[in-house]
Image (cartoon, grey):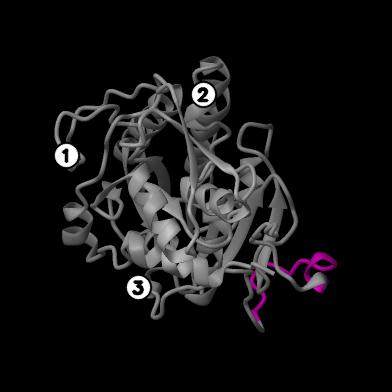
Amino acid sequence: MRLAAVSCVSDDASVFASTPKWGQSPSRISIRSVTLIEPISAASAVAGKRILVLGGNGFIGCHLTAALVRAGARVRVMGRSCTPGVDGGVEYVKGDIAGQIAFDEVLDGIDQVYHLVSSTIPGTSNANPVLDVQTNLVGSLRLLDAMVTAQVRGLVFLSSGGTVYGNPEELPVREDHVLRPISSYGVVKGAIENYMRLYSMLHGFDISVLRLSNPYGLGKTLIGTQGVIPTIFSKVINGDVIEIWGDGHAVRDYIHMDDAVRAMLAVAGLRGFNLFNVGSGVGHSLRDVIDHVSRVTGLEPTIKFGPARPFDVRAIYLDVSKIQSVAQWKPEISLEQGCAMYWEGMDRR
C-alpha cells in the first residue's frame, strides 16, 4: 500500500483562483489535515491584530496561520509560494527572506511578525556556513532594520531547542544553559537570538524567542521530509527500511503541533524580550518513537543501523517550566497520544 502525501494546501480548488483581500472577513477557514485544540489560548492577544507570518506556507506556518485567523487576527503570509495554504481572509505575498524582498512593503500596516523562516536544516548547514549566514542571519537583520523603519514592535521568532545547546551538560535543558551548537544551523539561530535581544534593548521591541523542540503532526509531507515521525510512519506503512544513524538511542523532545501553536499564541502579548523553551519536556529515543508507530499501526518495522553523524546531538529534551510560569502554557499531548492522533487522521486511501 502506498500513501498519498499529506499537504497543508486547501482541497478547495477555488482558492487558487482568487486570493482573499487584506482584512476581508473569512466566511470559512479550511486547512487540510489540520485539527486545532479548542479553545485557542491567548486568542485575545491577537484578535483584531494585523499579523505577518514569514514562512506561513510551511508546515508550522500553515497551522499557525489557521489558528491566527480562527482567533480573529488579520493575517498576511510571506512565503516562497503564493499558493494559499489556508482558505479564509489571508493575504499571500511571494517573497524570500534571503532575497531582495522589500520588507517595508510587506510590513505596511502590520502590528506583529511571526518569523518562522530558515533556508537550511541542521543536517546540511555545515556544508556551507557562509550561505547559512548570508541567507538566514543577514535576512533576519534586514527584517529587524525594516521593523525599526516601519515602527513594528512585536515579533515572535522560532529558534531551535534541538540545536542551539549542542550536547547539554544536564537534562532537561534550561534556557540559561550555555550554548555550544555543533551545527551552523544552531550557531546562526543563536546569533539571530542575540541580535533580537539587542534590537529589543535599543528600539523597545517586544520579542519572544521560542526554542522549539521537534514538532510533528498532520499536514507535513510524508516523503522527503526532515521530520522524524512522519518519515517513520511512511516507512513502516510502506514496508521500507528505516535507516538510523547511530544505535537508535539518540534522545529528542517531540512536541505535537497543536501544543506548539498554543505556545506561539500564548506569548503574543508579552512585553520586552523573552526567551522560552517550548517542548513536551520529555525525552524519547528513536527506538521509542518506532515502537509507538509500530504499536498504533500494528506493523513491524525494518531497521538498518549506520554510523552516527558528528552534527547529531546525542540526547536533549527541554525544561519548559519558564513558559509555564510566565505565559501559563503547558504541553497537553503525549507522544503516545500524538502518534495515535497522527495515525487516525492520515489519508491512507
Query: Can you identify the residue that label 3 sits on?
Result: 41
Marks 2 and 3, how far apart in space?
35 Å
Q: Secondary structure at mark 3?
A: loop
Task: Give the residue type at disc 2.
Answer: Ser
Up-down relation of residue 279 to residue 312 (above or below): below
Query: Can you identify the residue that label 2 sits on?
Result: 125
Q: Is residue 237 left or right of residue 265?
A: right
Q: Is residue 128 left or right of residue 305?
A: right
Marks 2 and 1, how far apart in space?
25 Å
Query: Can you identify the residue that label 1 sits on?
Result: 171
* Label 3 neighbour load within 10 Å: few <14, some 14-19, many 20+: some
Quadrant for residue 26, please give it: bottom right
Percent position of residue 318, x then y: 24, 45
Q: Is residue 170 left or right of residue 146?
A: left
Q: Earlier in the sequence, mark 2 or mark 3?
A: 3
Magenta span includes 322: no
Q: Main secondary structure of the magenta part?
A: loop
Quadrant for residue 167, please give it: top left
Magenta residues span 14-26
Please say whether residue 68 is visible from this viewpoint: no
Up-down relation of residue 165 to residue 73 (above or below): above
Q: Secondary structure at mark 2?
A: helix
Mark 3 or 1, closer to the camera: 1
Q: Secondary structure at mark 1?
A: loop
Report how many numbered discs are placed on residues in the image: 3
Percent position of residue 36, x then y: 47, 73
* Label 2 neighbour load within 10 Å: few <14, some 14-19, many 20+: many
Mark 2 or 3, closer to the camera: 2
Task: Give the residue type at disc 3.
Answer: Ser
Task: Give the residue type at disc 1.
Answer: Leu
114 vs 111, nearest the viewer: 114
Q: Is residue 67 left or right of residue 109?
A: left
